[in-house]
Amino acid sequence: MDEEQKNLKFPEGFLWGAATSAHQVEGNNHNDWTEWEKANAQRLAKEAGGKWQKWQQKKFPEIFDPANYISGRACDHYNLYEKDFDIAKSLGHNAHRFSIEWSRIEPEEGKFNEEAIEHYRQVILALRARGLEPFVTLWHWTNPIWIRDIGGWHNPKTIEYFLRYTKLMFREYRDLVRFWMPLNEPGTQISLGHILGKQPPGEKKLLKANKIFKHLIIAHKEAFTLSRQLQYPFEIGASHFMFYFMAYNNYLWNYIPKTIISYLADRRFFKVFNNYSDFFGIQYYQPFIVKLKIGGRVLGIIENKQPGEKRSDLGWEIFPKGIYHNLLKVAKYNKPIYITENGLADSDDSRRESFIKDHLFWINKAINKGADIRGYFHWSLLDNFELPEVRGFWPKFGLVEIDYETMERKIRPSAMEYAKICKNNSLIFHD
Ligand code: BGC
């Protein structure tokens, strides 16, 4: 055998699983996104030709179909969660990350829906019964309609309302849930929803966005403080989307904008959340290459044009070593780290297995360098309604494929490979 085989072990008790979010999988929600989707689906379908590359248009003609942009029944996970958790268990997972849909718990201001509260209790119990440790997110970007109508997160009242909902969730599930993430990637919602206008509410208002970000920060901090006041044995996590920033061609002049961008995107987040979190949830997908153009314009290369082995269906570059650098950066804050999202859109499942293994290789290296990494959640358990930029159903992120007509679940081959890693708590790697 000329290639060397290595058995890379993970720490004892390492958590293995996958992640989802309510609006992406549940189906039949009624929140600010639902209405925005209906109002914008036609436009998104019309603009798809200008947004996606020719190879993507050819491979995924559904990008021209307005139905792609309406979450509708999604994966009907609201009804089929037990079946989905059976699959997760069969795949050797021992943890699962999901989110609670605020608009179901509190469809009208101050009116809490007992059925929905009971539903999520059953969801959590179903996880526990299968030996899956629940990681609960309380806000994955969607808001109840009445929150939208008072101005969303721009209105400081929303912080109060969010904390009232948080307190209720903490109380209801205090004996069942240890790991909580009040907010999912606040920075992404700020940039895509409030600065670039690519997802609800579709605004492009920098100053307003900054204020909203501040409100989200307060909400997280106060949720953390609340958990301490209540003296529940919780671990509260802050989730952060991380690109891996690189200077184009390693040119010196690209290092300057790279350093500034990286500072703004990452350092600020960790500084702000460090004293108000028990762990960090890191969500890594791709690198971001920073290039300074003549005239001083900064150009970031994220979604490249060509298809290929080293790119996902969204055109994102696959760069596993980026997670290693990011994790070492986060390790400096001396907190437990969970990778709460990492994955790719890969409809034919030709790249997912190596994607997972290569990322885990670098995660393992970061652990050996001293980073306190305690779990990995692949994004996602199921194909789903891709939320960022309201991309819709065509990007296929699932370990499990969904037939949206029949709601049939089909385990992808890469999921079986990931299952071996989960079950052995180690990765056999070929050099
Ligand atoms: C979000 C997910 C999303 C994933 C893939 C993350 O930023 O939290 O909701 O589906 O990226 O784009």
Image (tube, rainbow, N blue to C red):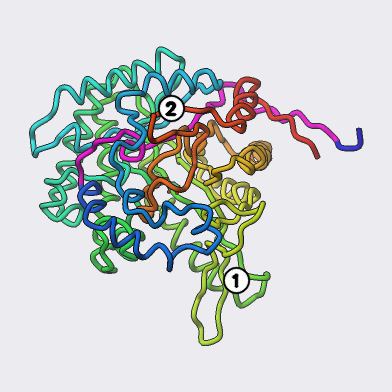
Between residue 343 and residue 328, name the one nearer to us. Answer: 343
Percent from the top left, x then y, of residue 50? 43, 68
Q: Is residue 405 above or below residue 292?
A: above
Dot 2, how many residues are within 10 Å of its Cα: few (below 14), some (14-19), or many (20+)? few
Q: What element carries label 1?
A: helix
Percent from the top left, x then y, of residue 132? 45, 20
Q: Can residue 70 be seen here?
A: yes
Which numbered circle lies on residue 408? 2
Quadrant position of the C terminus in the picture: top right
Dot 1, how many residues are within 10 Å of its Cα: few (below 14), some (14-19), or many (20+)? some
- What amino acid is found at the position of numbered circle 2 in the picture? Glu
Quadrant position of the N terminus in the picture: top right
**Quadrant location of residue 108?**
top left
Residue on which disc 1 sits: 255
Magenta region: which residues? Answer: 4-31
Q: Can residue 187 be seen here?
A: no
